[in-house]
Amino acid sequence: MPKVNRVLETSLYVADLDLSQAFYERVFGFGVMLRDHRMCALDVPGRQALLLFKLGASVTPSETPYGLIPPHDGHGRQHLCFSIDSADLDEWQAHLEAVGVAIESRLEWATGGSSLYFRDPDDHSIEVGTAGLWPNDPGR
């Protein structure tokens, strides 16, 4: 079996690309790597990318100088989790409160990890979680 190293990118589909880009820059400090009329690629530490796609803007193939990107789209509330250090959990809680983001839930998992859940402008469920949420977490 060929090996997979990590998740390189993940995506969310958003109603207002400007509003969502501003949210992820303000809350996480992610920088913009690429931006056009249909999407914004944000730099997530650890050689990862968060792609924000404007709803309905990628339902046809996208031609690029490098080749054709197949169509895709998503609807409804989606979920993603960013890994954080255990020592930073309380700092994250204070940061979210300071930037006006309501914390929906804080969980202390039986496996030893902790999570904070909150919503982005499109009502997606966003989580920051410490090591210990999953048995394959190398920080556990």
Image: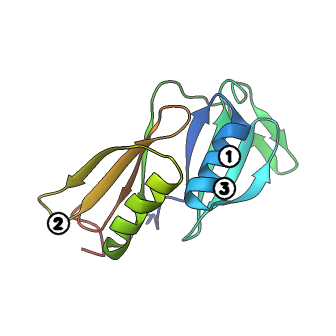
Q: Please state which amino acid type lies under the numbered disc 1.
A: Gln
For the question of whether residue 83 can be seen, the reply is no
- Which labelled disc corresponds to residue 72? none
Q: Nearer the viewer, residue 93 or 130?
A: 93
* In this picture, residue 15 sits left or right of residue 136: right
Which residue is the site of mark 2?
112
Cβ atoms at labels 1 and 3 below 8 Å apart: yes
Badge 1 or badge 3: first in the primary sequence: 1
Q: Position of residue 129 (x, y in %)?
A: 34, 59
Mark 1 secondary-structure assignment: helix
Q: Position of residue 2 (x, y in %)?
A: 44, 64
Which residue is the site of mark 1?
21
- Residue name at image x 42 percent, y 43 percent: 102
- Which labelled disc corresponds to residue 42? 3
Q: CA distance from mark 1 to mark 3?
A: 8 Å
Q: Quadrant of residue 44?
A: bottom right
Q: Please state which amino acid type lies under the numbered disc 3.
A: Leu
Mark 3 secondary-structure assignment: strand
Q: Quadrant of the N terminus?
A: bottom left
Q: Please state which amino acid type lies under the numbered disc 2.
A: Gly
